[in-house]
Structures are given as C-alpha cells and as structure tokens.
C-alpha cells in the first residue's frame, strides 16, 4: 500500500476516531495532574459535570483536522471550505451526542455507569467523524472562515462557562454539588 492511499483524507478522518478518543480521554485528567492550573482548566474538564466533560472534544477534533490540512492539504488539493465544514460537523455532532445519550440512559433507566460514559464518548467521536466523512464525500461546505469563527466561539463559551456556568443540571458536578471552578485569588 503506498503512502498516498495510507494517508488519504478519507482514511485520515476515520483514523481520527481512536486519536480523538485517546487524546480526549487523557484531557480528562490534565487539570488535576497540573495541580489544578487555571490555564489548563480553560481547555480541560475541571469537575465531573456533563458540560466539563464536553471539553474533551474541541482541541482533539480541531487539532486532528487542522493538522492534516496543514500537512497534507496541498498534496491532496483539499478544499478548505469542505475540509473545515467536515471538522465543524464532527465536533458539533459529538458535542450534541454526548449529553443526549448520557441523559437518556441515566434518566430513562436511573443508572450511572462509568463504562457506559466511556462508550458514549467513543460512540460520539465515531459518529461525528463518520458523519463528517459523509459530508466530506458529498462536498458539503460553508466558508472556512465561518467554521473557524464557530470553533473560536465554542472554545470561548467553554472558557466562559468554566468560571460562570449557568446553574442548571448540565453544569452541575453531582459528586461535589459545585458548578464550574472557583479561582483561588
């Protein structure tokens, strides 16, 4: 198999599933391992709320798609609008899937299982990447600048809600009864 086939855009999208899952899973522990560094907490979960766990997605998804575009975009003549629309679809799908499935299984069945949460994360990543691949194949796109603006907006919302989360269940750490993070100033 030649390197052109091995690193084709479509294969790269699918190879992102284990990478995004792995890096996202590692991000789960970064805040505590950094001695609760606030800068690290802007981009990684700072508590056990569903919202904070969604922070495990943006950097790995955006990074995976951006890295390939930077390294191989010219080689494959990637259309930046189509490519970054795919990235946006991957991220958006994953961000929506996690709370939908989490609240379905916890509320419908009254159970909470860590292994189920991990499977939901993996499924959400796989669904996001698969849907993005389908959209990439069909050439679905919006201007890349809009995708990038939305990425920045998503990251800013995560940063904002780290310090000022709404007092609703999505943002509640059920293990501590706390919302967000309280800076030690």
Image (cartoon, rainbow, N blue to C red):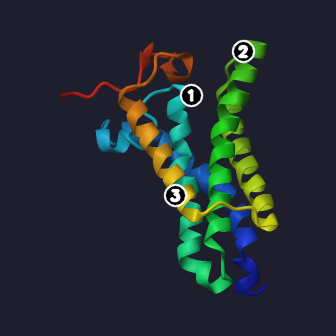
Residue for badge 3: 148
Q: In which quarter of the image is residue 81?
A: bottom right
CA gap, disc 3 and disc 1:
24 Å
Question: What quarter of the picture does the N terminus occupy?
Answer: bottom right
Task: Please tell me whether residue 71 is drawn above or below residue 117 in the rendered image.
Answer: below
Q: Are marks 1 and 2 in contact (CB under 8 Å)?
A: no
The number of callouts visible is 3
Task: Please tell me whether residue 102 is drawn above or below residue 106 in the rendered image.
Answer: below
Task: Identify which residue is drawn at 67% across, 37% down.
Answer: 96
Task: Please tell me whether residue 98 is drawn above or below residue 103 in the rendered image.
Answer: below
- Tell me if 174 is positioned left or right of 163 in this view: right
Say whether disc 3 or disc 1 marks the residue closer to the N-terminus. 1
Q: Which of marks 2 and 3 is in front?
A: 3
Residue for badge 2: 107
Q: In which quarter of the image is residue 142?
A: bottom right
Q: In which quarter of the image is residue 75?
A: bottom right
Task: Identify which residue is drawn at 68% across, 48% down.
Answer: 125
Task: Please tell me whether residue 177 is drawn above or below residue 156 in the rendered image.
Answer: above
Q: Dot 1 lies on which element? A: helix
Residue for badge 1: 50
Q: Position of residue 72 (x, y in %)?
A: 60, 79
């Amino acid at each position: 198999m030649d390197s052109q086939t091995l690193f084709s855009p479509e294969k790269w999208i699918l190879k992102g599933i284990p990478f995004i899952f792995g890096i996202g899973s590692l991000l789960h522990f970064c805040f505590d391992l950094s001695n609760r560094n606030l800068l690290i907490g802007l981009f990684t979960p700072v508590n056990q709320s569903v919202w904070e766990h969604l922070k495990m997605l943006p950097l790995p998804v955006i990074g995976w798609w951006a890295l390939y575009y930077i390294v191989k975009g010219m080689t494959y003549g990637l259309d930046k609008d189509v490519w970054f629309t795919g990235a946006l679809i991957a991220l958006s799908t994953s961000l929506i899937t996690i709370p939908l499935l989490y609240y379905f299984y916890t509320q419908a069945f009254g159970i909470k299982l860590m292994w189920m949460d991990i499977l939901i994360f993996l499924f959400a990543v796989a669904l996001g990447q698969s849907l993005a691949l389908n959209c990439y194949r069909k050439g679905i796109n919006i201007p890349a600048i809009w995708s990038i603006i939305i990425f920045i907006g998503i990251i800013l919302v995560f940063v904002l809600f780290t310090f000022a989360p709404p007092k609703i269940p999505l943002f509640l750490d059920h293990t501590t009864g706390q919302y967000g993070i309280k800076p030690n100033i």
